Every structure is written in C-alpha cells, then in structure tokens.
Image: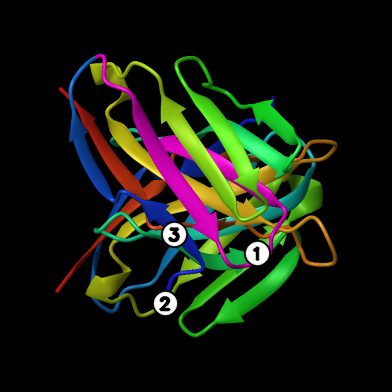
C-alpha cells in the first residue's frame, strides 16, 4: 500500500457542488500539504499544515478550505466547485524532525468540474 | 518570493543519449529536490540534494548552493525516462517547497 493515499483518484462533478478530497499517510510525518497542478504547469501550494493545530494558506487558497482531522489525515474541500478548479491535486507530507524534510507525494486526484 | 527556473522547457532525445537539466533559483535554499512525473501523473522522488553531488544508477545530480543552481544528469536515456522533471526548493527562512515549471523530456526509441 502507498505511504500517502489520496481518495478519490478521479472525480467528475458539476459547477456548484461541494467536493472533498481526502489524504491519509502512514509515514508518521507531521507536515502535510495540498498542491494543485494545471496542464503544462508546475505545482502550486494551496494549503499546508505543520501539525494538527496549525493550518496555513498557500499561494492559491481562494475557493478552498482544509481540515487536519489527525496527524495522519488532511482533507481539501471545494465548497462550491467551479470549472477553473479542474486540475490534478496532490497531497504531500514531510517530516520536521530528525529527517531531512524531504517531500513525499500521493498519487494524485484528478478533478473535473463541468 | 523565490523564483525557480528550469531549462530547457522541452527536450527530445534518442534512446541512449545523455542530457543535462538545469534548475536556477533566485535566493538561498535549505532544501532542494528533483522529481520525475511519469506519463501517468505520478510524482517520483529522484534526489533530495540541497548541496553536493549524488548518484543513483544512470541519474546523478549536483547542487551548487552558493551559485544558486542544480543540475540533473541523465545518462544512456531510455524511453521510460520520458515525462516531466521538476525541481523544487525551500527558500532559507521559509518552510514551503516552491516548484519550477519543469522540463518535459521525450525519449524516442
């Protein structure tokens, strides 16, 4: 099983619907991130969390919210989806402790908003 | 904020050729990673290399932090090397990885 698991892997929805993307990890890392990738572009940071009580906005947080339910779980919500939120979404983790801070990604969630 | 530029943006190689991908960054960094995004969209960790040189099989990487660049070398390229290569950095004094826009590599059989 993957160390960083995202669900769903693919989702098609309609404008105005609420969508939640979930991420869970078994790496024991304290830091978790949500990134968005648009075709032909790099990854842009939506939100990040350095522990359960710490949530921070990234570069492109408008239209998104997050919840850190536990150290191992970090969810991304689109309260009212719009077509320009069609993208590939990635969850990632890193460790602030004795390890290097290396970033590890889930397999991605492909979201299409019609 | 820090700027991360990768070059070339696109690269086409014949199988067996060697290549060098470059990542320039505009400020000092604490962390630097190279990733390969395969045609199925998965992001694969290649190197964690904030400084120095590392090698893993046909791939190697060098980061010269004082001159603010990193290089990824691919030798004897194979069709499975195709995809997009991303460089990502954490600027000193910050805690977030910022990504370059990638180098899209296509290796022809």
Q: Residues within 10 Å of mark 3 (few under 14, many from 20)?
A: many
Distance in Å between CA atoms under marks 2 and 3: 32 Å
Residue A49 to residue A77: above or below: below
Residue that mark 3 sits on: A5
Residue visible at 38% across and 57% down in the picture: A107
Secondary structure beneath label 2: loop
Q: Quadrant of the C terminus of chain A?
A: top left
Residue that mark 1 sits on: B48
Dividing the picture into quadrants, the one containing residue B96 is: top right
Residue visible at 56% across and 73% down in the picture: B60
Chain to which mark 1 belongs: B
Residue visible at 62% across and 40% down in the picture: A68
Q: Nearer the viewer, mark 2 or mark 1?
A: 1
Q: Residue B85 magenta-drawn?
A: no
Q: Which residues are magenta?
A: A16-36
Q: Position of residue A36 (x, y in %)?
A: 43, 35
Q: Nearer the viewer, mark 2 or mark 3?
A: 3
Q: Nearer the viewer, mark 1 or mark 3?
A: 3
Residue B75 image label = 2
């Amino acid at each position: 099983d993957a160390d960083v698991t995202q669900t769903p892997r693919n989702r098609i929805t309609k404008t105005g619907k609420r969508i939640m993307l979930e991420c869970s990890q078994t790496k024991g890392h304290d830091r978790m991130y949500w990134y968005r990738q648009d075709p032909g572009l790099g990854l842009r940071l939506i939100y990040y969390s350095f522990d359960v009580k710490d949530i921070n906005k990234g570069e492109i947080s408008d239209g998104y919210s997050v919840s850190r339910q536990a150290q191992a779980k970090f969810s991304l919500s689109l309260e009212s989806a719009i077509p320009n939120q069609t993208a590939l979404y990635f969850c990632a983790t890193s460790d602030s402790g004795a390890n290097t801070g290396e970033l590890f990604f889930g397999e991605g969630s492909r979201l299409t908003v019609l | 904020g820090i700027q991360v530029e990768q070059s070339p943006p696109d690269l086409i190689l014949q199988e067996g050729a060697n290549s060098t991908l470059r990542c320039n960054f505009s400020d000092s960094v604490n962390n630097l990673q190279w990733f390969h995004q395969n045609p199925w969209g998965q992001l694969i960790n290649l190197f964690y290399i904030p400084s120095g040189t590392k090698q893993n099989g046909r791939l190697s990487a060098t980061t010269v932090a004082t001159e603010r660049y990193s290089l990824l070398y691919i030798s004897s390229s194979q069709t499975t090397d195709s995809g997009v290569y991303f460089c990502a950095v954490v600027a000193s004094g910050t805690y977030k990885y910022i990504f370059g826009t990638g180098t899209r590599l296509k290796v022809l059989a």
